[in-house]
Amino acid sequence: MIPFFSSEQIQQALPCTTLISAMRVAFRDAAQAPRRHVHPLSDTGSSTLLLMPVWQANAHLGVKLVTVVPENQARQLPTVQALFILLDTTTGTPLALMDGEELTLRRTAAASALASTYLSRPESEHLLIVGTGQLAPYMAVAHCAVRDIRRVTVWGRDRQKAQLTIEKIQALGLPASVVIDAAEDLDAASKAADLISCATTSRHALLQLASVRPGTHIDLVGGFKPDMREADDGLMSTARLFVDTFDGALAEAGDLVQPMQAGLITRASVLAELADLVSGRHAGRSNAQDITLFKSVGTAIQDLCAADLVWQHFKV
């Protein structure tokens, strides 16, 4: 019987800084990761099944199965649930099953933090987290791992959920010197932040250009379908745009697809993908006044990187 690695075991095997360092190498090396399969599970299209394959020759391959059900919030269940299968590429032999949700939360946050090392200002001190879902606490911890953040502010439509998110951030662990609070007004909080990480399932833009000051870095990780939006057209037209992968983001991210269809931005507006940043093909931020924006929809390269670390940690 193949082993199953639980959420608790994955937490043990994937310290934030370790995963970020490994991901820097993973995006530089070659891995085959076809565009993920997306299948609606309901007539309204709100529930989705994602299938994400990835492999490296003479190493490992994997497939992640993900369900995204926004209505689960009302059921007191996670919006995103997932399972990852790790196999041997040469023989096709299954090696392990892993809790895909914990894997996804940690790898998503690590990729954004990795991008931040190239795109946010090194002196960034104030982080705004937009959203109160499962991913939000992980985003806060990961961004604090790569920048000397002094203050983390959390905004959500529900003040009680924002407070619960703050408690989860504290439970995951931040330096005692970091001040964590909740924001009543998103526009005011956006104007005060150096770095904004948005992790929602919103279909309407939450972040407005008028509320983002020069030099801010924007991290968008929530909208993974063409009908989802987290940033308005003004912000998408003004910011210097970067993505996790061209293949995924240009096809799936509403924050890119919609303004492209409207003729407000072009393919050339998207300057680089994460592999270009880690390999040095693109330098990232060019000056302190630019608004930079990283749009992530997720790639199985991240999953395989994290799964390999888990396998190495527990392999006897």
Image (cartoon, grey):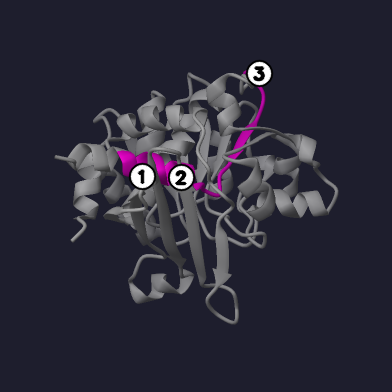
The residue indicated by pointer 1 is: 106
Q: 10 Å neighbourhood of mark 3: few (<14), some, or many (≥20)? A: few
**277 w.r.t. 110: above or below:** above
Q: Quadrant of the C terminus?
A: top left
Q: Residue at position x 78%, y 35% from top?
A: 268
Q: Residue at position x 38%, y 45% from top?
A: 90
Residue 43 in the figure: left or right of residue 251: left
Residue 192 in the figure: left or right of residue 210: left
Out of 287 and 303, give the one closest to the viewer: 303
Label 3 sits on a secondary structure element that is: loop
Question: Alpha-carbon distance for marks 3 and 1?
Answer: 28 Å
Instruction: Judge whether residue 290 is colored magenta.
Output: yes
Disc on the earlier residue, 1 or 2? 2
Q: Amino acid at mark 1?
A: Arg
Q: Which residues are magenta?
A: 288-308
The residue indicated by pointer 3 is: 286
Out of 48 and 191, give the one closest to the viewer: 48
Q: Position of residue 174 (x, y in %)?
A: 27, 34
